[in-house]
Amino acid sequence: METVTITRERMALDLLLWRRFGGAGRALIASTLTLNPGLAALGPVLPLGAVVTLPEPPIEASQRSRKVLSLFGDA
């Protein structure tokens, strides 16, 4: 599991998860709150210096591949 320290102002938990995991981060809000007792009591905006333990990424998010598209045909 990864631990993150909040270093930016106005950082919300859902924004933190979106920046780390992309769209799959939305599904991790509940598990993140479970891993971090008392995090919800800090309010909707996480204070500077708050330490957040992130859950493991969903399998589909960590193993996602993108198809490469070439403008010049197959190389």
Image: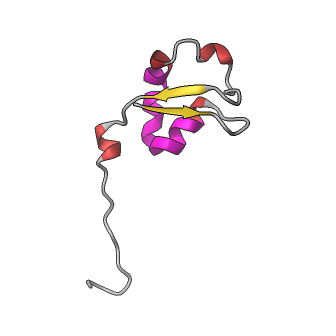
Give left or right: position of 68 versus 44. Answer: left
Q: Nearer the viewer, residue 69 or 39?
A: 39
Q: In this view, does 12 lie above or below 69?
A: above
> What's the residue at 69%, 39% (across, down)?
8
- In percent of the image, x 60 and y 16: which residue is there? 40
> Picture quarter containing residue 47?
top right
Residue 27 in the magenta stretch? The answer is yes
Left or right: where does residue 26 sit relative to residue 45? left
Q: Which residue is drawn at 68% across and 19% down?
A: 43
Q: Where is residue 51 in the image (x, y as percent from the top left)?
A: 58, 26
In the rendering, at what x and y percent does residue 70 appear? 35, 79
Question: Residue at the location (47% across, 24% down)?
Answer: 32
Horizontal side of 35 relative to 70 (left or right) equals: right
The residue range painted magenta reads 15-32
Q: Which quadrant is the C terminus positioned in?
A: bottom left
Q: Does the magenta stretch include residue 51?
A: no
How was the colour assigned to the protein in this rendering? Answer: secondary structure
